Image (cartoon, helix red, strand yellow):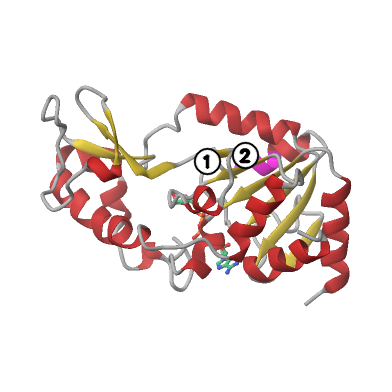
Amino acid sequence: MNIEQLEKAAEIIRKSRYTVAFTGAGISVESGIPPFRGENGLWNRVDPVYLEIDFFYTKPYQSWKVIKEIFYDKLGDAVPNLAHLTLAKMEERSYLESVITQNIDHLHQKAGNKRVCELHGTYKQLVCTQCHSEYDLSFANLNFLPPTCYICKGILKPDIVFFHEPIPKLVEKRSFEEAAKADVMIIIGTNAEVLPAARIPEIAKEHGAKIIEINIQPTHFTNSLTDIFLEMKATEALGKIGELLYL
Ligand code: APR
């Protein structure tokens, strides 16, 4: 563990005026949720075509069957880990303004964060493809797929961003604004290979933010925009930062 780098990171966060966290699948790996890419990545065993928006509209049953298995059967039982919990404490103690996440797992909110931009949506909500009514997951019956709308009988879609589907404008705008306001951005557990998410750290950097990156391995940001690279697990790095901030 590089304690000097961790102390430097904690000091930057302590002195910052507006710290924003940008998270990806890596932060939830220690909660038992697999990442998308790499050795144990989801896309190694599941064809991403099921998450393409055109496929969903033409074959909703097939799409839902896979989505239920990879997300809905697992995410409900997942609990936040020390990394999520530290970010929640940081927000509570005014060390963190907001979290921008690409994750759909709702673990930042479960941990206690209030200001969360969910760039890729959330599995917790379903939306009708016909009348656009929105349902909390608890109202949907996933024993019969695809689930349908109580009002118009239209097919319900998970409120997540599918491949080839645009990010909801408001969330995108808010995320870009947060990135521009940040004087410190902590990137945690993401390859950020998909746009526009990959733009978030760049926007922060362009506006003068210091970038702290936490990942078990280097990414394409590490040698381009990262100022402090903490090559370790998210729970390890944030656990230690939490101690250094006396959370
Ligand atoms: N701690 C920190 N980082 C970790 C850990 C860990 N315990 N485990 C894995 N990582 C890192 C990996 O090294 C990798 O850089 O997390 C990253 C996960 O990358 P991806 O699986 O590509 O996930 P992400 O970047 O969030 O993907 C972005 O792609 O397909 C989509 O829509 C999906 O939101 C997702 C988007």
Q: Mark 2: which amino acid? A: Arg
Q: Mark 1: which amino acid? A: Leu
Q: Quadrant of residue 83?
A: bottom right
CB under 8 Å between discs 2 and 1: yes
Q: Residues within 10 Å of mark 2 (few under 14, many from 20)?
A: some
Q: Position of residue 154 (x, y in %)?
A: 14, 30
**Residue 244 in view:** yes
Q: Position of residue 86 (x, y in %)?
A: 66, 58
Q: Nearer the viewer, residue 8 or 191?
A: 8
Considering the numbered disc 1 on the image, is that residue within a helix, a strand or a loop?
A: loop
Q: Circle 1 sits on which residue?
A: 195
Q: Is residue 136 above or below residue 189?
A: above
Type of secondary structure dominating the magenta stretch: helix
Name the residue located 16 percent from the left edge and 32 percent from the top edge. 149
Q: Is residue 223 above or below residue 56?
A: below
Q: Residues within 10 Å of mark 1 (few under 14, many from 20)?
A: few
Left or right: 232 in relation to 26: right
Q: Which mark is residue 199?
A: 2
Q: Which residues are magenta?
A: 198-202
Q: Nearer the viewer, residue 225 or 158?
A: 158
Q: Which mark is residue 143?
A: none
